[in-house]
Amino acid sequence: MPEPHTHHKSGHGHLDLIIALSAIFISAVSLAVAVHHGKTMEKLVAANSIPHVTVESGNILPELGTAPVSHASLRNVGVGPAQIKSLTLRYKGKPVRSLQELAKTCCNLDLDAAEMVVNQERDRFIPAGERSLIYRFPKTARNAEIWDKMEQARRDVDLDICYCSVFDECYRYVTGPTRSRSRVKQCEPQGDREFIP
C-alpha cells in the first residue's frame, strides 16, 4: 500500500505561516494584475474601434472638376467602422423626410429627382476613412434656377445623426449653430421623421 504524500514543513510554525500567507498574497496580487491588464486591453480594443462621423457638404466636388455640384455625405474619420442608426434632416428646425419635401418646404418647388444622385439606403455601415453619399445634385442649364434655390436652402439645413461602433457604443452628432457630439446609451428610431433622400 503506497504511503500518503505529505508536504514538507520547515518545522517552524511561524515560518510555515509566513510562507503560506506570502503565497496567498502573491496569488492575490497576480490575480489583481491580470484583471487590471484585461480591463486595460478591453479599453484599448474599444478605443481602437471608435468611429467619428462628420458631415461633408458643399457646392463643389473636386473629383468632378469645377462644375457646381450641391452635395452632402457622411464621412467616418474615426478608427473603427460606424453603423448609422438614424438620420434626421431639419430645415430651419423643422424635420423633412426627403429632398422633395425639402424643396417643397423651402422653396415651393417640385424637385425633379431624376437630376439627382441619392442614397436611400437606411442601413448605412461606413468603414473607417470612408464616406456614404446622402445626395449629389449637379447644376445644369435646365435646372439652374431650382439649383440656386436649393443651394441657398442648404445653408439652413441641420443634420441629426446617431451612430454606433461595433461594440454598440453610440454617439449623437448634431450639425448647425448648436453643433454638438455626445455619447448616448442607444440610438432611438426616428420613425416618420427619418430622412430618406
Image (cartoon, rainbow, N blue to C red):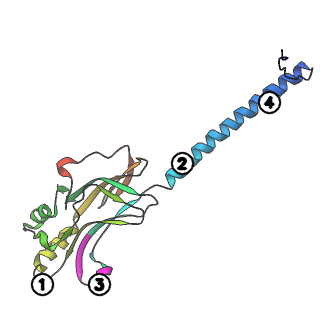
Q: Which tag, 4 or 1, sits closer to the chain's start? A: 4
* Residue position marked by numbered label 4 in the rendering: 22
Residue 9 in the image: state x and y as whole percent: 89, 22
Name the amino acid, label 2: Lys
Q: Is residue 65 magenta?
A: yes
* Mark pair 4, 1: CA separation: 86 Å
Quadrant where the N terminus is found in the figure: top right
Q: Judge by depth and name the residue closer to the eye, 50 or 8.
A: 8
* Mark pair 2, 3: CA separation: 43 Å
Q: Which residues are magenta?
A: 62-71
Q: Which tag, 2 or 3, sits closer to the chain's start? A: 2
Residue in view at x 15 percent, y 82 percent: 140
Helix, strand or loop status at disc 3: loop
* Residue position marked by numbered label 1 in the rendering: 141
Q: Which tag, 4 or 2, sits closer to the chain's start? A: 4
Q: Nearer the viewer, mark 4 or mark 1?
A: 4
Helix, strand or loop status at disc 4: helix
* Mark pair 4, 3: CA separation: 74 Å
Which disc is residue 43 wearing? Answer: 2
Residue in view at x 59 percent, y 43 percent: 38
* Mark pair 1, 2: CA separation: 54 Å
* Residue position marked by numbered label 3 in the rendering: 65
Left or right for 189, reference 182? left
* Mark pair 4, 2: CA separation: 32 Å
Name the amino acid, label 4: Ser
